[in-house]
Image: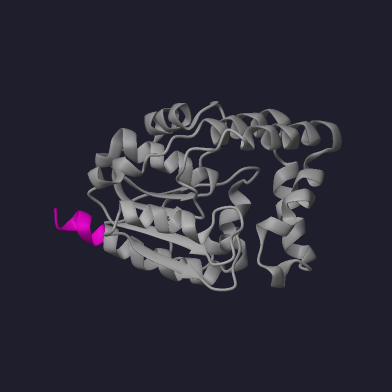
Amino acid sequence: MSLPLVLLGGTLCDGALWQPLCRHLPPQPMIIPEMSGADSAEQLAAQLLTDLPARFLLVGFSLGALVALEMQAQAAQRIAGLALLAVNPLADAPVNAAGRIALLDRAAKNGMRSVIEQLWPRYVHASRLADRELLGALVTMAERSSVERFRQQTAIAIQRRDLRHTLPALQAPLLILNGDSDAICTPEHHHLLVKAAPAARHITLEQCGHFLLLEQPQACARALQTWIKRSELCVSTL
């Protein structure tokens, strides 16, 4: 059985985020929704669930992983497998709101490039800081976005809920994947998630930052391919 693979990207990302990964995956039906149209993860999750097939595999990266957690909280029975990549499962600390809003103001005044360039040192492993091609890919994605979409995504990040307590209801394979040098969604954040879901498969990629899908697409693809096979096997034995 080949279930659709639903891919939810991060802040200021679009379908280009997934292209390096997909080149290393076998052919599979894929759906890459736009991460916009709502001001909270709860609203966006409900919106996506309305339009998606009855059963699917779900992969979320960063902001997309927050929305994926909301989707499994709302409709765990529809998710045949869940993969959470580079995620902070905690509710956002109130002190973070001012900094997030300042980035939004920066985007409105100086453009999306200025936002990516400010965040760049925290986005990738130190060995990739001189990688202008990778920086350019992130800037290009961001510049295809809009300030309004960024505003919605900022609101989602600020208002997110801690949903770790809902994971035991998920009767499907769970993969947790992170970079060992992620300064945004740290290894500790992922360990907290694993504590809430001890049956999950947890993989940490070495010498990798937050943008693991672009830094190490082959390693991500290997982990996801194993998870896909396991998820589809579980569905076929039901």
The magenta stretch spans residue 147: no
Does any portion of residue 216 appear in the rendered image?
yes
Query: For residue 108, which quarter of the picture?
Result: top right
- Residue in the picture at 40% in, 54% down: 192
- The secondary structure making up most of the magenta span is helix
View extreme (front): residue:
95
Residue 53 at least partly seen: no
In this figure, which colouring scheme has been used for the structure?
one colour
Residue furthest to the right: 110
Q: Quadrant of the image for the N terminus?
A: bottom left
Q: Position of residue 78 (x, y in %)?
A: 28, 40
Tell me the residue at 21%/54% (across/down): 235
- The answer to which quarter of the image holds residue 120 is bottom right
Would you say 234 lies left or right of 56 here?
A: left
Location of residue 106 with respect to 179 vertically, above or below: above
Left or right: 56, with 160 as reference point: left
Q: Does the segment drawn in magenta span residue 237?
A: yes
Which residue lies at the image location 49% right of the left edge and 48% below the top edge? 88
Question: Relative to the observer, which residue lies in front, 49 or 62?
Answer: 62
Q: Position of residue 138 (x, y in %)?
A: 71, 53
Residue drawn at the location 76% of the way across and 67% of the way down: 131
Q: Is residue 77 left or right of residue 224?
A: left
Q: Position of residue 31 (x, y in %)?
A: 46, 45
Range drawn in magenta: 232-238
